[in-house]
Amino acid sequence: MSADSTPSRKLRPASQTLANEIHYSSHTDPSRVSFTDRGKRIDVWQQQDEAAVLAALQLGAQKWGTVTVTGPTEFKQLCAQLAAQHGIKINNPELRPVAVHGPGERPPLLAKPAAAQSPSTAYQMHKADILNRIEVRNPSQLDWMIAVRMRVTGHDQQAVKQALKENASQGRESENRNWANYVERTADAVYGPRGDRECARSEQRAEAWARVEGRNLASERQVQPSQRQKVPQHDRGDFERD
């Protein structure tokens, strides 16, 4: 699916400055600027407004074909999700596996903003990434690999249990297995001595595996948890010409 030829109809040009900057605002709140087209860059002021972000993405795709996203991690992940849904190409290497797919290809699993990302989504992303790289015939081995990745990227044991509970039995209905027991044993093993050893060997892969989930561990480590909960109003996300 290609990007729409014009920005979302929910937003409109509000004003144009002498510097050739075009401000876009919502029909429902014309006094509030949603994003600004500065020619070679689009500044998005309402980062948590999906309609505004999508319209800005569509405008950028219309102007340049592809866009480079800068700004807070949550904003970039929302852009990746919307880009994947609407066929918009993003240049960012850390977002490209999430956001870009060609005609006829199976759409990839979507990254959600970090605050809303579920363990199940992380599980599915890692499953798709692993199967895209290698053939794993043993479903239990695949579950182990995914659970190790999730631990290495910072998910706690309860999150891994939730992911396994919601996904491990899918496609395996013919197996006569106590799935609740399977989930407990697998999670306990991943967070036990065997998991300790494997995670220690895999620690250098944490950044790459986090990118599978649409995350940037380096950025997350620089921001305190309390700061991640709310993006300051004066911050902005940008779309730039590559």
Image (cartoon, rainbow, N blue to C red):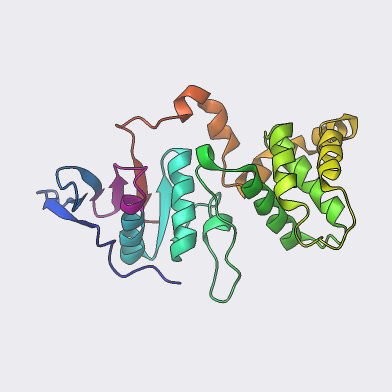
192 w.r.t. 50: above or below? above
Quadrant assignment, res 133: bottom right
Residue drawn at the location 57% of the way across and 42% of the way down: 215
Could you tell whether 87 is left or right of 57 in the image? right
Quadrant assignment, res 57: bottom left
Residue with the most extreme left position? 18
210 w.r.t. 84: above or below? above
65 w.r.t. 226: above or below? below
Q: Whole-percent x and y of residue 105?
A: 59, 72
Residue drawn at the location 77% of the way across and 62% of the way down: 171
46 drawn magenta: yes
- For the record, the magenta segment spans 36-53
Count of numbered badges drawn on the protein = 0
Q: Whole-percent x and y of residue 196?
A: 84, 31
Q: Nearer the viewer, residue 178 or 118?
A: 178
Q: Whole-percent x and y of residue 151?
A: 73, 36
Could you tell whether 238 is left or right of 145 in the image? left
Quadrant of the frame with the C terminus? bottom left
156 drawn magenta: no
Quadrant assignment, res 102: bottom right
Residue drawn at the location 79% of the way across and 61% of the way down: 134
User: Is residue 148 visible to the viewer in this orientation of the structure?
Assistant: yes
